[in-house]
Amino acid sequence: MTGFDRRSVLKMGGGALAASALLPAHAFGQSTAINYWHTFTSQSEFAGLDEVMKLFAAAHPEITVTQENIPNPEFMAKVTAAVVSGSRPDTTMVASERVADLVAMAGLTDLTDRIASWDRRADFDDARFKSITVDGKVYGVPAFTFVDWMYYRKDWFDEAGLAPPTTFAEFRDAAIKLTDPAKGRYGFGMRAGAGGQAYVINVMEGFGAKLVQDDGTIGLDRDKAIEAVDWWAGLLTRDGAVPPSAPNDGFRQIMEAFQTGQTAMVWHHTGSFQDNAKLLKPGVEFATAVIPAGPVNKISRLGYAYNTVTNPDTIDAGWEWLKFWGEPDAAIAFLEKTGYFPASTAAAKDERISGNPLYKPAADTLAFGIPAPSFPGSAGWAEGVVLPAFQRVLIKEATPEQAVDEMIDGLAQAIG
Amino acid sequence: MISTTGPAYSPPRRSAFDRYNPLRWIGELSETRYWMYLLLLPSALLICAVVIYPTLYGMQMSFHEMRLNRPGLGNGWVGLKHYQRMVTDPIFWVSLRNTAVWVTSAIALEFVVGLVAALALNRNLPGSKILAVLILLPYFLPNVVAGHMWALMLDPRLGVINDLLVKVGLLQGYKAWFADPTTAMAAAIVVEAWHSFPFFTLLLLAGLKGIPTDLYKAADIDGAGAFSQLRLITLPMLKTIIAAAVILRVIGLVNSPDLLLILTSGGPGRSTQVLSLYAFQTAYKDFNFGYAGALSVVMFVLLMVFAWAYVRLSKVNED
């Protein structure tokens, strides 16, 4: 009987292996594989990412992108560990408030020259690159914009004969009027659990307690900050216009409360539009408005999510992936799935955005909105000091004066 | 008579290959007292690499400035600076107090529930084998999954626990367990106890199987009731296992912030802030690895002192 015995199979296998080692890599049509860390969590975000990846795969078959979700609260811990241990991802999505810390720990790669010669650079305002530029070096490409705005129950406002509030005073008034604990309704869904620190800082700035002064110095005006904390906490402690669960309410809780008819207003960014629209009728049950103006400043945040290269070894493939997010088709595809605004000015002028009246407050906010204050240590101070101090006021463990003093001391330590 | 004189013995000359043959060299070494040290060497190196070096590195970090987001401060030696800061840091003291409450209450609850479950399973009632497997299920769940699951079950709007408590009349309305400082720690302790009581059940059940039944028969004859048998036979016979289980759980609880990180992030305010969570936040939110290292060293020392004192006080070694 003729056939292959074990020895001949081994010989052939060894020969084939040796021959394959001599062939150039492109003989196999080998593609470059890169991974992408992001903090997307909702179904709509994943759908948007999937859409962008499909478009990218069609445009760049030679590059394979693998996405990895890192939960937002753990993101900095994971990235820090990856940078320190030398096991960096190839590309990473970075929120603007995290840029300073990541650049300080040498976690991002300088892309200044590539961005300067990028043919789509003119599609982006210079302001879009401000938060990703440190000491004149640009470390990433804006992928999309989180535009802070307000979602409100249009049907409840109509029923009560109220117009959407434009100032803090009107906002408080509406929140009180729309609160009816007997019906399980509260005027406002305050986020004072995970992530709530951003709103405390925004309200303080709305009252005139700016964190980063015009000359670049960092500090808090104690009196104005106390007034702000007192007013913001008072929505729960005095007015009872927010759910009692507020001190532990994070993103999921405030959105669930709004979507299930327990709160009349909620502040968040444009990214929740599609999720709200799945449960409430846009324009009928809910509508959108610009965040009300504070007594001193009108503060609304534009948070940019940047795509960055974290591993310089795969920078060529990483750069292709980063800049693809700036293509209008990719930006609109992502918007349609998620509601996240394009960072590219050219894409934002697309009829699919400018023709939709529900997006108008976001377009208006783009004119005056500013990024959150960011400096090395700001994220840690906000989360580790501002939020617990504010929560202590909510649970009546501290006065606004004590909380603000705690914030000022913590700030001195963070930047000292 | 045997002559002892004669030509002197000379060992056969080794060839050059023999002289440098490593196998022969190892063979000769195996006859010496150094052989046992050689056999221990790989394990010793491994322990040094994965246990001693990281521990010492963590300790030396606590004496250095190490703020990843402030490279301008350098990595210089700062002596006891971080430890001095700790003395005046109110968050440290709150965290220390909360750690004591968290660990003591959770382990007491886990032990009691674990013991009851182990005693029940040891009775070999019908279905107890299936129950023994089912009872372990919570322990198989990762902390992250258990944390998110309980966060939903205790949710003030959609949580099934609130719904049940309202329906049976124990609550007037839905309660935000983790938003109230008087209930946040207690709720977290219940979640922790639910998750980890099977650890006690498993070890205590193994211990119960090893207690001779003759002891109980003799106690029955002497008229000892169930409680007396538990106090005078079962618990003393389980002493070593209880000591080991408690020490392991204390170490596990003191060092793992994940459940509290998911349920409360240390809030509201600082009401559920514990040392491990504070060290984690200091390292990965403030990027201050020097101070985080100092906090970890304090936790390490506290655990060492606890383990030593507990073993001494429980008199386990006297058996």
Image: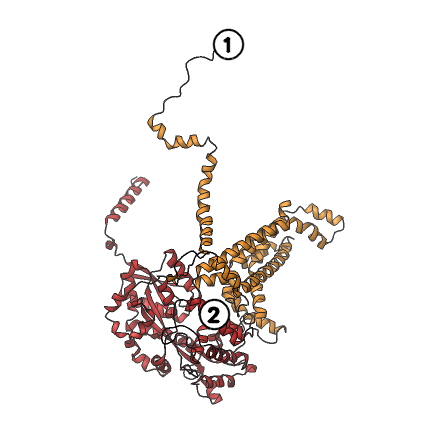
Farthest residue toward the top? B1
Q: Secondary structure at mark 2?
A: helix
| Along the line of sight, the residue nearer the viewer: A239 or A59 | A239
A377 vs A164: above or below = above
**Chain (red):** A
For the residues beneath circles 2 and 1, the answer to whether they share a chain is no
Check disc 1 and report the residue beneath it: B1
Judging from the image, what secondary structure is the residue with disc 1 in?
loop
Please provide percent x and percent y for residue A80.
Answer: 40, 61
Most foreground residue, B255 or A390:
A390
Q: Looking at the image, which residue is at 68% across and 47% down?
A: B213
Name the residue: 74% across, 50% down: B220
Snapshot quadrant of residue B65: bottom left
Quadrant placement of the N terminus of chain A: top left
Q: Chain of mark 1?
A: B
Give the chain letter for orange: B
Amino acid of disc 2: Asp
Q: The C terminus of chain A lies in which quarter of the figure?
A: bottom left
Q: How is the image coloured?
A: by chain
Closer to viewer: mark 2 or mark 1: 2
- In the displayed structure, B59 sits above or below A288; it is above
Q: Residue at x 26, y 48 (%)?
A: A21
- Which of the labelled discs sits on residue A409, or is there none? 2
